[in-house]
Image (cartoon, rainbow, N blue to C red):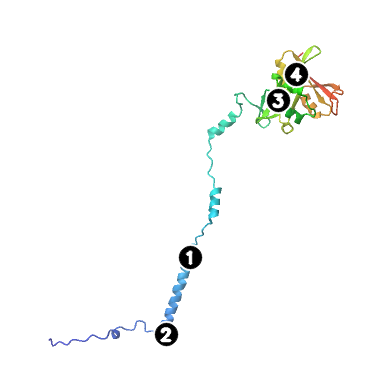
Amino acid sequence: MSDQAVDKPQNDTASKPEATGMSKSAKKRANKKQKKLSESEKTNTESERPVEVTQPETDKKKDKAEVKKPEKSNDAVDKLVPLIQRFDVNGKPLRTIAGNIPVHLGEITPHNILQLKKLNEAVFPIAYNDKFYVEARTCGDLGRLAYYNDVVVGAVCCRIDDISDEKSLYLMTLGTLAAYRQCGIGTILINYALKLCKKLEEVKTMYLHVQVNNEKAVSFYEKHGFVNDGIIEDYYRISPRDAYLLIKRIRN
């Protein structure tokens, strides 16, 4: 063995100095304080996190229902539709009234004679007998129905009479539904009758009867060139019984 002395290792506990130099009670208070600080930081961190709000399922469905896809517009079609609406199914230009409302004049036939009857019952205070409608079914150019959106809103029925050795066009009925008056439909119908008179060269005059209390009708016909030729007493069976005779000279 070597004569060199071997030093014994010193005790580990003795070699480690006191880390803090604090008593047990001080350490206990420091640990409690540290624990409180850690809990406070944890609470602050959780409060700063964004809160996620879950939308109820019913609200989601409602939102989806309210969201509508924008309709696709076709400029070419939008421009073409108004042009198409100016013509009827036969390609003929439609007549228009105030507000560019299309009015179509159609023939009176056995298929629509009941529409004429219902119109007359709604417009005129007197009831026309069956003979009137039998003749109207085959009146040809002497009668027309005025249609708005495929609904009959007016009509004119005529006949040719012999008065004082000359032909006259008698306006048996000319009227429009109350809701469509002051819209120019009556003017379209009276203009049709005037063109018919000019087409029939033998017709010299056009005339009709109007109740004396119907001031609006008298004003309407006078506006279109008719002249009040006086009163015919007891013409109607309803009150007032008297009628004005309105005449328009077409040609001499």
Mark 3 or 2: in front is 3
State how far apart marks 4 and 3 are (Cα).
17 Å
User: Regarding mark 4 in the picture, which secondary structure is present there?
Assistant: strand
Q: Is residue 90 left or right of residue 204?
A: left
What type is the residue that disc 3 sits on? Answer: Ile
Q: Which mark is residue 48?
A: 1
Determine crowd level at label 4: few under 14, some 14-19, many 20+ residues with C-alpha closer than 10 A. some
Q: Which mark is residue 25?
A: 2
State how far apart marks 2 and 1 are (Cα).
35 Å
Mark 1 or 4: in front is 4
Residue 96 x/y as whole percent: 66, 28
Q: Residue furthest left?
A: 1
Tell me which corner region of the image, top left, top right, bottom left or bottom right, holds residue 78. top right
User: Regarding mark 3 in the picture, which secondary structure is present there?
Assistant: helix
Mark 4 or 3: in front is 3
Q: Residue at x 42, y 79 (%)?
A: 31
State how far apart marks 3 and 2 are (Cα).
117 Å
Q: Residue furthest top?
A: 165
Mark 1 or 3: in front is 3
231 to 8, vertically: above or below: above
160 to 58, vertically: above or below: above
What type is the residue that disc 4 sits on? Answer: Arg
Q: Name the N-terminal-most of marks 4 and 3.
A: 3
Query: For mark 3, what is the residue?
Result: 113
Q: Name the N-terminal-most of marks 4 and 2.
A: 2
Residue 84 x/y as whole percent: 58, 28
Q: Name the N-terminal-most of marks 1 and 4.
A: 1
State how far apart marks 1 and 4 are (Cα).
95 Å
Q: Which mark is residue 159?
A: 4
Labels 4 & 2 near each other (Cβ < 8 A):
no
| The C terminus: image quadrant | top right
User: Regarding mark 1 in the picture, which secondary structure is present there?
Assistant: helix
